[in-house]
Image (cartoon, grey):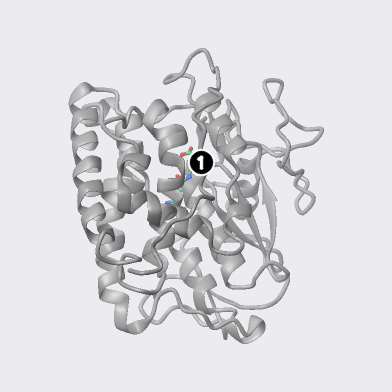
Amino acid sequence: MGLLQDGKWTDLWYPTKENGGKFVREDARFRNWITAHGQPQPDKPATLGFKAEANRYHLYVSLACPWAHRTLIFRELKSLQSIIDVTVVEPHMLHQGWEFAGPGQSKDAVHITGADEDTLNNKAFLYQIYQLAAPDYSGRVTVPVLWDKQTQTIVSNESAEIIRMFNSAFDHLTHNRVDFYPQALREEIDSLNKYIYSNINNGVYRAGFATSQAAYNEAFNEIFTALDRLESILSKKRYLTGSKITEADWRLFTSLIRFDGVYVGHFKTNKRRIQDYKAISGYLRDLYQVEGIAATVNFEHIKQHYYFSHANINPSRIVPHGPELNYLTPHNREAL
Ligand SMILES: N[C@@H](CCC(=O)N[C@@H](CS)C(=O)NCC(=O)O)C(=O)O
């Protein structure tokens, strides 16, 4: 685990000491946009515009990562599978960060089924993809990465923005006009996203990566206060904003699906399991059973990543076999 400093790889864990033991997530640095016609977003003049074209863009993802998982879900639900191809990194993120399968693997690497070689750029490590895009890059090397084959650069490494692009920029090519960010619900979705990001999506990391009891306590309390609030919303509505699935649901989904299998144990978010919340657990099964979604969930990569990569949290690197999970039982939420 590490980061690039002036284009050079440095093996460093997150600096929590200077923040009283708190984990503070760094902002993503590549923030350009793909639009149907290639102009930059009108409200983001500093960014470059990229034109939506078939087979021009490539996704680098980890199947373990909740942020990357969002992009795979949108690729699936927006019929982008044949237009945007994907490379899956190895789940173990070790001294050289994310790495690909294949002959260039680091000596500590263990190949896990489902990880790919980088046949597009022929690199061994994800940081080398960042170096291709910006030879003097400084910052963390994260997934997902949306790569432009034409200009050989990274369009975006911010999942929240990649899914917005996927939601609409390619509609004229795919003719899939399902809208997960409809105009009338934008304010509500934005406000849910903000709340869920800080208390759940990033909340579990703030609990798990905390290096002081106080920082852990704060995150832990915020997570379970938020889950109680979501339980109350979801006992009255099938999805967060009502009867239609929106972006806010998919952003919550990728954290919920990792909760009982990993966060409860590895990140110590163990006041309750998702299974113990009647409404949230039914809602999670409902989303999991949407066509195409189960195939985007890989529990082997998820468990291998967290338990094996974070040796400061789990020094033995033993990956637990349990718990038994079954998201295919009836959700009984149609009536809501
Ligand atoms: N803001 C980014 C966050 C992505 C992120 O933090 N990904 C994690 C994996 S779950 C990562 O690659 N971490 C490597 C690191 O922090 O060094 C997004 O949502 O796209």
Closer-to-camera residue (95/248)? 248
Q: Residue furthest top?
A: 316
Judge the density around disc 1: few (<14), some (14-19), many (≥20) Cα neighbours within 10 Å.
some
Q: Is residue 7 above or below residue 335?
A: above
**Residue at x 34%, y 45% (from the top left corner):** 202
Numbered disc 1: secondary structure: loop
Q: Is mark 1 within 8 Å of ligand 1?
A: no
**Residue at x 52%, y 47% (from the top left corner):** 137
> Can residue 11 be seen by looking at this rendering?
no
**Residue at x 59%, y 45% (from the top left corner):** 62
Specify the quadrant that holds the C terminus: bottom left
Q: Quadrant of residue 80?
A: bottom right
Residue 147 lies, in percent from the top left, at 63, 60
Q: Is residue 124 left or right of residue 268?
A: right
Residue 270 lies, in percent from the top left, at 31, 30
**Residue at x 52%, y 32% (from the top left corner):** 324
Residue 194 lies, in percent from the top left, at 27, 59
Q: Is residue 110 above or below residue 23?
A: above
Closer-to-camera residue (83/128)? 83
Q: Is residue 197 left or right of residue 68?
A: left
Q: Tell me which amino acid carries mark 1.
A: Asp
Residue 167 lies, in percent from the top left, at 50, 74
Q: Read off the residue under disc 1.
A: 6
Q: Is residue 130 above or below residue 303?
A: below
> Can residue 245 be seen by looking at this rendering?
yes
